[in-house]
Image (cartoon, grey):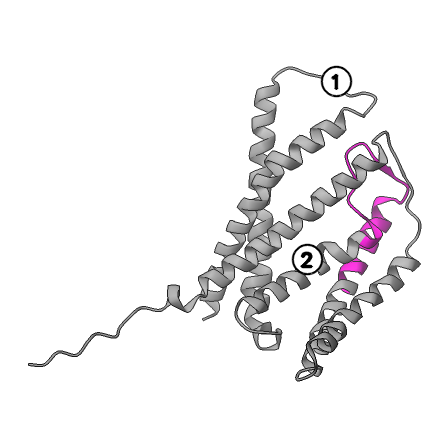
Amino acid sequence: MATDHLERGALAGVAGGLVYGLFVATVGNAFTAGLETFEPDHGHGGGLAVSDLTTAAAGVGGGVLWGLLFGVAVFGIAYYFLEPALPGSGATRRFALAAAGFLTVSGAPWLVLPPQPPGVEQSLGTEPRMLWYGGMMVAGATVAVLSGLAHRRTAGRHTAVRAAATLAPLALLAIPAALAPANPVHGHVPAALASAYRWTVVFGQVALWTTIAAVHAWFDDPELAAVDTDYPSTAD
């Protein structure tokens, strides 16, 4: 049983990582290349076609590796132990786990340290950024657990009440976000493009988690997994 969970998690992760990698190789890399033109020392070297091909391959490969990691760790191992505690059933459980994974790995940390485009310098040093990122990951995981508990405690209540109770713990993330040190950034990228870059990164991560959850649920579809062993009876 555990091996089956790991296998399904790995396959779903590869599928999600492939979608994410293709997004990075096409949209993400093109956007990043455009932003790099705002750097003062930006130059144009030779071998552009080879460089683009290598960058695209690295984007796809990196996306697959990230997807495989999340698929095995979250949908292979964590889902195996947490399945009974997850809200809903079937695909709903997968998407709930995907939302918790996104909140833990990206959503909560980005409240303090949002993605920055290339060429942007941050005031905080690497060590404090890593500490705050790790701390916000813990905060995100904690809030995800509290949301799950609130969902269970409000079983039988009106849908609106249950939804409000489930989402209420998210407000707790405002506390560490407000206590985080300021991190002014400096660079030549216009603010509008920097914001668009961040939303592009967010979209890519949401697509990654959503695809993994959808494929994982598809693998567990009884119509796909079950083998029809019912044969019509025949009279001798």
Element under disc 2: helix
For the image shown, how many numbered marks are present on the structure? 2
| Front of the two marks 2 and 1 | 2
The residue sitting at 52% across, 70% down in the picture is 90
Tell me if residue 10 comes above or below residue 228 in the rendering.
Answer: above
Residue pointed to by mark 1: 43
Residue pointed to by mark 2: 102
| Amino acid type assigned to the residue bearing label 2 in the image | Phe
Mark 2 → mark 1, Cα distance in angstroms: 36 Å
The residue sitting at 61% across, 31% down in the picture is 55
| Amino acid type assigned to the residue bearing label 1 in the image | Gly
**Quadrant housing residue 79:** bottom right
Q: Which residues are magenta?
A: 111-138
Give how far across and how far down residue 77 sits, in percent.
Answer: 56, 65
Q: Tell me the quadrant of the picture where the N terminus can be found.
A: bottom left
| Residue 186 among those drawn in magenta | no
Give how far across and how far down residue 44 sits, in percent.
Answer: 71, 17
Q: Is residue 130 left or right of residue 228?
A: right
Mark closest to the chain's N terminus, 2 or 1:
1
Tell me if residue 120 comes above or below residue 39 in the rendering.
Answer: below
